[in-house]
Image (cartoon, rainbow, N blue to C red):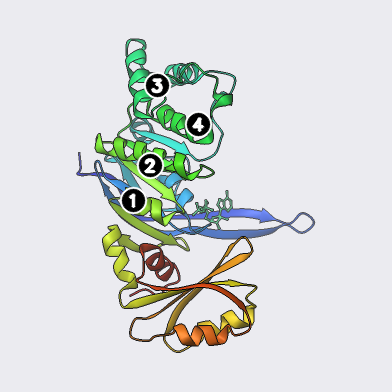
Amino acid sequence: MGDYAIEADDLRRTYRSRAGWLRPRRTETEAVRGVSFAVGRGELFGLLGPNGAGKTTTIKMLNTLLIPTGGTARVCGFDVVDDTREVRRRIGYVFGGDRGLYDRLSALDNLRYFAELYGVAPREQKRRIAELLELVKLTGRERERVEGYSRGMRQRLHIARGLLHSPEVLFLDEPSIGVDPVAARELRRTVADLAAAGTTVVLTTHYMAEADELCDRIAVIADGRIQALGTPAELRHHADGRRVVEVEAYGVPDAAMTAVSKLPGVRETAVEARGALQLLTVQSDAAVDVQADVLRELAGIRIGRVTSREPTLEDAYVAIVNGTGA
Ligand SMILES: Nc1ncnc2c1ncn2[C@@H]1O[C@H](COP(=O)(O)OP(=O)(O)OP(=O)(O)O)[C@@H](O)[C@H]1O
Protein backbone atom coordinates (compact mmCIF):
# COMPACT_ATOMS: atom_id res chain seq x y z
CA MET A 1 0.00 0.00 0.00
CA GLY A 2 1.42 3.35 -1.03
CA ASP A 3 2.06 6.37 1.12
CA TYR A 4 -0.64 8.37 -0.58
CA ALA A 5 -4.37 8.38 -0.03
CA ILE A 6 -4.87 9.87 -3.50
CA GLU A 7 -2.71 10.01 -6.59
CA ALA A 8 -4.05 11.77 -9.66
CA ASP A 9 -1.97 11.63 -12.80
CA ASP A 10 -2.87 13.84 -15.75
CA LEU A 11 -6.61 13.47 -15.11
CA ARG A 12 -8.85 14.76 -17.84
CA ARG A 13 -12.54 15.01 -18.46
CA THR A 14 -14.32 16.32 -21.52
CA TYR A 15 -18.11 16.64 -21.48
CA ARG A 16 -19.82 16.09 -24.79
CA SER A 17 -23.33 17.38 -25.08
CA ARG A 18 -25.85 18.38 -27.68
CA ALA A 19 -27.14 21.92 -27.52
CA GLY A 20 -30.01 23.40 -29.46
CA TRP A 21 -33.29 21.82 -30.43
CA LEU A 22 -34.04 22.62 -34.06
CA ARG A 23 -30.44 22.26 -35.13
CA PRO A 24 -28.62 20.32 -32.43
CA ARG A 25 -24.94 21.09 -32.31
CA ARG A 26 -22.35 19.04 -30.52
CA THR A 27 -20.45 21.01 -27.93
CA GLU A 28 -17.41 19.87 -26.03
CA THR A 29 -16.33 21.24 -22.67
CA GLU A 30 -12.87 20.38 -21.42
CA ALA A 31 -13.76 20.63 -17.74
CA VAL A 32 -10.51 19.10 -16.44
CA ARG A 33 -7.39 19.41 -18.59
CA GLY A 34 -4.60 17.32 -17.12
CA VAL A 35 -4.58 17.54 -13.34
CA SER A 36 -1.86 15.81 -11.28
CA PHE A 37 -1.45 15.81 -7.52
CA ALA A 38 -0.98 13.49 -4.56
CA VAL A 39 -2.62 13.67 -1.15
CA GLY A 40 -0.90 12.12 1.84
CA ARG A 41 -2.73 9.88 4.30
CA GLY A 42 -4.39 11.97 6.98
CA GLU A 43 -3.87 15.16 5.03
CA LEU A 44 -6.53 17.86 4.75
CA PHE A 45 -6.30 18.88 1.13
CA GLY A 46 -8.21 21.76 -0.45
CA LEU A 47 -9.35 22.25 -4.03
CA LEU A 48 -10.00 25.93 -4.46
CA GLY A 49 -11.18 27.73 -7.55
CA PRO A 50 -13.80 29.95 -9.17
CA ASN A 51 -17.13 28.68 -10.56
CA GLY A 52 -16.68 26.21 -13.36
CA ALA A 53 -13.00 25.64 -12.57
CA GLY A 54 -13.39 21.85 -12.62
CA LYS A 55 -13.36 21.10 -8.88
CA THR A 56 -16.53 19.02 -8.75
CA THR A 57 -15.59 17.17 -11.91
CA THR A 58 -12.21 16.30 -10.39
CA ILE A 59 -13.82 15.06 -7.17
CA LYS A 60 -16.37 13.00 -9.07
CA MET A 61 -13.61 11.23 -10.98
CA LEU A 62 -11.79 10.46 -7.73
CA ASN A 63 -14.90 9.10 -6.04
CA THR A 64 -15.83 6.93 -9.07
CA LEU A 65 -19.01 8.80 -10.02
CA LEU A 66 -17.49 9.94 -13.30
CA ILE A 67 -15.08 8.10 -15.61
CA PRO A 68 -12.05 10.12 -16.67
CA THR A 69 -11.62 10.69 -20.39
CA GLY A 70 -7.87 10.71 -19.83
CA GLY A 71 -5.22 10.07 -17.21
CA THR A 72 -5.42 7.86 -14.13
CA ALA A 73 -6.19 8.17 -10.44
CA ARG A 74 -5.70 5.89 -7.46
CA VAL A 75 -7.42 6.13 -4.10
CA CYS A 76 -5.83 4.18 -1.24
CA GLY A 77 -3.76 2.45 -3.91
CA PHE A 78 -6.77 1.33 -6.00
CA ASP A 79 -7.49 2.51 -9.50
CA VAL A 80 -10.73 4.51 -9.71
CA VAL A 81 -11.75 2.81 -12.96
CA ASP A 82 -10.44 -0.75 -12.59
CA ASP A 83 -11.03 -1.21 -8.84
CA THR A 84 -14.20 0.81 -8.37
CA ARG A 85 -15.55 -1.43 -5.60
CA GLU A 86 -12.37 -1.28 -3.55
CA VAL A 87 -12.31 2.50 -3.90
CA ARG A 88 -15.96 2.87 -2.89
CA ARG A 89 -15.46 0.85 0.28
CA ARG A 90 -12.81 3.30 1.41
CA ILE A 91 -14.39 6.66 0.60
CA GLY A 92 -17.21 8.87 1.79
CA TYR A 93 -18.76 11.71 -0.18
CA VAL A 94 -20.62 14.71 1.19
CA PHE A 95 -21.89 17.44 -1.07
CA GLY A 96 -23.16 20.85 -0.08
CA GLY A 97 -26.86 21.67 -0.11
CA ASP A 98 -29.87 19.87 1.20
CA ARG A 99 -30.23 16.67 -0.77
CA GLY A 100 -29.85 13.21 0.67
CA LEU A 101 -31.48 13.31 4.10
CA TYR A 102 -34.98 12.27 5.13
CA ASP A 103 -36.63 15.36 6.61
CA ARG A 104 -39.49 13.51 8.29
CA LEU A 105 -37.11 11.26 10.17
CA SER A 106 -34.99 12.11 13.18
CA ALA A 107 -31.23 12.40 12.77
CA LEU A 108 -30.90 9.10 14.59
CA ASP A 109 -33.28 7.30 12.23
CA ASN A 110 -31.51 8.83 9.24
CA LEU A 111 -28.20 7.50 10.49
CA ARG A 112 -29.70 4.07 11.29
CA TYR A 113 -31.18 3.89 7.81
CA PHE A 114 -27.93 4.80 6.09
CA ALA A 115 -25.90 2.53 8.37
CA GLU A 116 -28.09 -0.34 7.19
CA LEU A 117 -27.70 0.78 3.57
CA TYR A 118 -23.91 1.04 3.84
CA GLY A 119 -23.68 -2.40 5.41
CA VAL A 120 -22.42 -1.33 8.82
CA ALA A 121 -22.55 -4.50 10.96
CA PRO A 122 -25.62 -4.38 13.25
CA ARG A 123 -23.46 -4.92 16.35
CA GLU A 124 -21.37 -1.86 15.39
CA GLN A 125 -24.19 0.50 14.47
CA LYS A 126 -25.10 1.82 17.88
CA ARG A 127 -21.54 2.59 18.92
CA ARG A 128 -20.63 4.07 15.54
CA ILE A 129 -23.69 6.34 15.43
CA ALA A 130 -23.09 7.57 18.98
CA GLU A 131 -19.45 8.28 18.09
CA LEU A 132 -20.40 10.25 15.00
CA LEU A 133 -23.13 12.25 16.75
CA GLU A 134 -20.45 13.23 19.22
CA LEU A 135 -18.01 14.21 16.46
CA VAL A 136 -20.53 16.44 14.67
CA LYS A 137 -21.86 17.81 17.95
CA LEU A 138 -25.45 16.64 17.52
CA THR A 139 -25.57 14.48 20.62
CA GLY A 140 -28.76 15.37 22.50
CA ARG A 141 -30.51 16.57 19.34
CA GLU A 142 -30.56 13.21 17.54
CA ARG A 143 -34.22 12.44 18.24
CA GLU A 144 -35.47 15.64 16.64
CA ARG A 145 -36.80 15.57 13.11
CA VAL A 146 -34.33 16.84 10.53
CA GLU A 147 -36.93 19.24 9.11
CA GLY A 148 -36.39 21.41 12.20
CA TYR A 149 -32.61 21.46 11.77
CA SER A 150 -30.68 24.55 10.71
CA ARG A 151 -28.53 24.31 7.58
CA GLY A 152 -25.40 24.04 9.65
CA MET A 153 -26.85 21.14 11.64
CA ARG A 154 -27.97 19.43 8.46
CA GLN A 155 -24.54 19.81 6.99
CA ARG A 156 -22.97 18.25 10.07
CA LEU A 157 -25.46 15.40 9.87
CA HIS A 158 -24.46 14.93 6.22
CA ILE A 159 -20.88 14.59 7.35
CA ALA A 160 -21.87 11.99 9.95
CA ARG A 161 -23.76 10.12 7.24
CA GLY A 162 -20.71 10.17 4.98
CA LEU A 163 -18.57 8.70 7.76
CA LEU A 164 -20.82 5.81 8.84
CA HIS A 165 -18.78 3.14 7.11
CA SER A 166 -15.52 4.59 8.52
CA PRO A 167 -14.02 5.67 5.20
CA GLU A 168 -10.31 6.38 4.97
CA VAL A 169 -10.94 9.31 2.65
CA LEU A 170 -13.78 11.81 2.88
CA PHE A 171 -14.67 14.11 -0.01
CA LEU A 172 -16.42 17.28 1.04
CA ASP A 173 -17.83 19.34 -1.80
CA GLU A 174 -18.60 22.93 -0.73
CA PRO A 175 -19.54 22.01 2.84
CA SER A 176 -20.28 25.55 3.99
CA ILE A 177 -22.44 26.66 1.08
CA GLY A 178 -25.48 28.52 2.44
CA VAL A 179 -24.36 28.10 6.03
CA ASP A 180 -24.18 31.21 8.23
CA PRO A 181 -20.76 32.34 9.52
CA VAL A 182 -21.17 31.00 13.05
CA ALA A 183 -22.40 27.61 11.85
CA ALA A 184 -19.62 27.57 9.25
CA ARG A 185 -17.08 27.96 12.03
CA GLU A 186 -18.57 24.95 13.85
CA LEU A 187 -18.46 23.03 10.64
CA ARG A 188 -14.79 23.85 10.15
CA ARG A 189 -14.08 22.63 13.66
CA THR A 190 -15.77 19.33 12.85
CA VAL A 191 -13.70 18.94 9.69
CA ALA A 192 -10.50 19.77 11.56
CA ASP A 193 -11.33 17.20 14.29
CA LEU A 194 -11.97 14.62 11.65
CA ALA A 195 -8.60 15.15 9.99
CA ALA A 196 -6.88 15.22 13.37
CA ALA A 197 -8.38 11.78 14.02
CA GLY A 198 -6.63 10.46 10.90
CA THR A 199 -9.19 10.66 8.09
CA THR A 200 -7.90 12.05 4.82
CA VAL A 201 -10.13 14.93 3.76
CA VAL A 202 -10.44 16.46 0.32
CA LEU A 203 -12.41 19.66 0.46
CA THR A 204 -13.63 21.91 -2.32
CA THR A 205 -14.51 25.48 -1.52
CA HIS A 206 -14.89 28.96 -2.95
CA TYR A 207 -13.81 30.47 0.32
CA MET A 208 -10.15 31.25 0.59
CA ALA A 209 -10.41 31.96 4.32
CA GLU A 210 -11.92 28.53 4.88
CA ALA A 211 -9.18 26.81 2.90
CA ASP A 212 -6.55 28.89 4.69
CA GLU A 213 -7.80 27.96 8.13
CA LEU A 214 -8.30 24.26 7.46
CA CYS A 215 -6.05 22.93 4.79
CA ASP A 216 -2.55 21.52 5.05
CA ARG A 217 -2.16 22.12 1.34
CA ILE A 218 -4.29 23.77 -1.32
CA ALA A 219 -4.48 23.26 -5.07
CA VAL A 220 -5.84 26.31 -6.85
CA ILE A 221 -7.75 25.20 -9.93
CA ALA A 222 -8.90 27.48 -12.70
CA ASP A 223 -9.79 26.63 -16.25
CA GLY A 224 -9.46 22.90 -15.62
CA ARG A 225 -5.82 23.12 -14.57
CA ILE A 226 -3.88 23.41 -11.34
CA GLN A 227 -2.54 26.95 -11.29
CA ALA A 228 -0.71 26.66 -7.97
CA LEU A 229 -0.27 24.03 -5.28
CA GLY A 230 1.22 24.39 -1.82
CA THR A 231 0.70 25.20 1.82
CA PRO A 232 -1.24 28.40 2.54
CA ALA A 233 2.08 30.03 3.45
CA GLU A 234 3.59 29.00 0.11
CA LEU A 235 0.60 30.27 -1.84
CA ARG A 236 0.81 33.59 -0.07
CA HIS A 237 4.16 34.17 -1.80
CA HIS A 238 2.32 34.65 -5.08
CA ALA A 239 1.47 38.14 -3.83
CA ASP A 240 5.01 38.92 -2.70
CA GLY A 241 6.22 42.36 -3.65
CA ARG A 242 2.72 43.77 -3.78
CA ARG A 243 0.72 46.26 -1.83
CA VAL A 244 -3.06 46.58 -1.76
CA VAL A 245 -5.19 49.71 -1.73
CA GLU A 246 -8.85 49.28 -0.85
CA VAL A 247 -11.36 51.99 -1.62
CA GLU A 248 -15.02 52.07 -0.61
CA ALA A 249 -16.98 53.90 -3.28
CA TYR A 250 -20.50 54.41 -4.62
CA GLY A 251 -21.40 54.03 -8.30
CA VAL A 252 -18.03 53.58 -9.94
CA PRO A 253 -18.41 53.60 -13.75
CA ASP A 254 -16.65 50.87 -15.75
CA ALA A 255 -14.55 53.49 -17.50
CA ALA A 256 -13.05 54.60 -14.18
CA MET A 257 -12.15 51.00 -13.32
CA THR A 258 -10.51 50.53 -16.69
CA ALA A 259 -8.50 53.70 -16.11
CA VAL A 260 -7.42 52.47 -12.66
CA SER A 261 -6.35 49.11 -14.03
CA LYS A 262 -4.12 50.86 -16.57
CA LEU A 263 -2.28 53.02 -14.03
CA PRO A 264 1.49 52.46 -13.86
CA GLY A 265 2.36 49.91 -11.15
CA VAL A 266 -1.17 48.47 -10.92
CA ARG A 267 -1.18 44.67 -11.27
CA GLU A 268 -4.71 43.64 -10.39
CA THR A 269 -8.09 45.26 -9.81
CA ALA A 270 -11.36 43.89 -8.51
CA VAL A 271 -14.75 45.34 -7.61
CA GLU A 272 -17.06 43.71 -5.12
CA ALA A 273 -20.59 44.93 -4.47
CA ARG A 274 -21.55 45.24 -0.81
CA GLY A 275 -25.06 46.55 -0.76
CA ALA A 276 -25.03 50.11 -2.06
CA LEU A 277 -21.29 50.21 -1.58
CA GLN A 278 -18.57 48.97 -3.90
CA LEU A 279 -15.27 47.76 -2.57
CA LEU A 280 -12.42 48.37 -5.00
CA THR A 281 -9.29 46.32 -4.45
CA VAL A 282 -6.19 47.48 -6.28
CA GLN A 283 -3.02 45.41 -6.14
CA SER A 284 0.15 47.18 -7.15
CA ASP A 285 3.91 46.74 -7.05
CA ALA A 286 4.91 47.49 -3.47
CA ALA A 287 7.54 49.96 -4.72
CA VAL A 288 4.89 52.14 -6.39
CA ASP A 289 2.49 54.19 -4.28
CA VAL A 290 -0.65 54.16 -6.40
CA GLN A 291 -3.12 55.52 -3.87
CA ALA A 292 -3.04 59.14 -5.02
CA ASP A 293 -3.37 58.10 -8.69
CA VAL A 294 -6.28 55.78 -7.91
CA LEU A 295 -8.15 58.52 -6.07
CA ARG A 296 -7.51 60.93 -8.93
CA GLU A 297 -9.17 58.50 -11.38
CA LEU A 298 -12.15 58.33 -9.02
CA ALA A 299 -12.53 62.11 -8.78
CA GLY A 300 -16.20 63.13 -8.58
CA ILE A 301 -17.29 59.76 -7.21
CA ARG A 302 -18.46 59.47 -3.62
CA ILE A 303 -15.72 57.76 -1.64
CA GLY A 304 -15.81 56.07 1.77
CA ARG A 305 -12.91 54.56 3.62
CA VAL A 306 -9.51 54.18 1.92
CA THR A 307 -7.03 51.62 3.24
CA SER A 308 -3.52 50.62 2.22
CA ARG A 309 -2.44 47.19 3.45
CA GLU A 310 -0.25 44.11 3.03
CA PRO A 311 -1.61 41.43 0.68
CA THR A 312 -3.56 38.51 2.16
CA LEU A 313 -3.93 34.96 0.92
CA GLU A 314 -7.12 36.13 -0.83
CA ASP A 315 -5.06 38.61 -2.86
CA ALA A 316 -2.58 35.86 -3.71
CA TYR A 317 -5.50 33.71 -4.85
CA VAL A 318 -6.76 36.47 -7.15
CA ALA A 319 -3.26 36.82 -8.61
CA ILE A 320 -3.00 33.03 -9.13
CA VAL A 321 -6.41 32.68 -10.77
CA ASN A 322 -5.71 35.63 -13.08
CA GLY A 323 -2.32 34.18 -13.93
CA THR A 324 -0.38 37.25 -12.85
CA GLY A 325 1.14 35.91 -9.60
CA ALA A 326 4.87 35.72 -8.86
N1 LIG B 1 -22.70 17.22 -16.95
C1 LIG B 1 -22.08 18.21 -17.60
N2 LIG B 1 -22.25 18.38 -18.93
C2 LIG B 1 -21.62 19.36 -19.60
N3 LIG B 1 -20.77 20.25 -19.03
C3 LIG B 1 -20.57 20.14 -17.71
C4 LIG B 1 -21.20 19.14 -16.92
N4 LIG B 1 -20.80 19.29 -15.62
C5 LIG B 1 -19.96 20.33 -15.60
N5 LIG B 1 -19.80 20.86 -16.85
C6 LIG B 1 -18.92 21.97 -17.21
O1 LIG B 1 -17.59 21.66 -16.84
C7 LIG B 1 -16.92 22.80 -16.29
C8 LIG B 1 -16.41 22.47 -14.89
O2 LIG B 1 -17.49 22.26 -14.01
P1 LIG B 1 -17.33 21.83 -12.48
O3 LIG B 1 -18.68 21.62 -11.95
O4 LIG B 1 -16.36 20.71 -12.38
O5 LIG B 1 -16.67 23.13 -11.87
P2 LIG B 1 -16.55 23.57 -10.35
O6 LIG B 1 -15.16 24.07 -10.19
O7 LIG B 1 -16.99 22.48 -9.45
O8 LIG B 1 -17.56 24.78 -10.30
P3 LIG B 1 -18.52 25.28 -9.13
O9 LIG B 1 -17.64 25.94 -8.14
O10 LIG B 1 -19.42 26.22 -9.85
O11 LIG B 1 -19.23 24.07 -8.61
C9 LIG B 1 -17.92 23.92 -16.36
O12 LIG B 1 -17.65 24.66 -17.52
C10 LIG B 1 -19.26 23.24 -16.44
O13 LIG B 1 -20.19 24.03 -17.13
Q: Quadrant of the N terminus?
A: top left
- The span from disc 3 to disc 2 (Cα, nearest Å) is 18 Å
Cα distance in 3D space between marks 2 and 1: 8 Å
The numbered mark, 3 or 2, whose residue comes first in the sequence reads 3
Chain-order first, disc 2 or disc 1: 2
* Residue located 45% across and 62% down the image: 222
- The furthest residue to the top: 123
Asked which secondary structure carries label 2, the reply is helix
Mark 1 secondary-structure assignment: helix
Q: Is residue 249 above or below residue 234?
A: below
Tell which tag, 4 or 3, sits nearer the viewer: 3
In the image, is 274 to the left or to the right of 13?
right
Label 1 environment density (alpha carbons within 10 Å; few <14, some 14–19, many ≥20): few
The residue that mark 4 highlights is: 154
Left or right of 273: which side holds 173? Answer: left
Question: Given contact means CB atoms under 8 Å apart, are the residues at marks 2 and 1 in contact?
Answer: yes
The residues tagged by marks 4 and 2 sit, at their Cα atoms, a distance apart of 14 Å
Q: Which residue is mark 3?
A: 139
Q: Amino acid at mark 3?
A: Thr
The amino acid beneath tag 1 is Glu
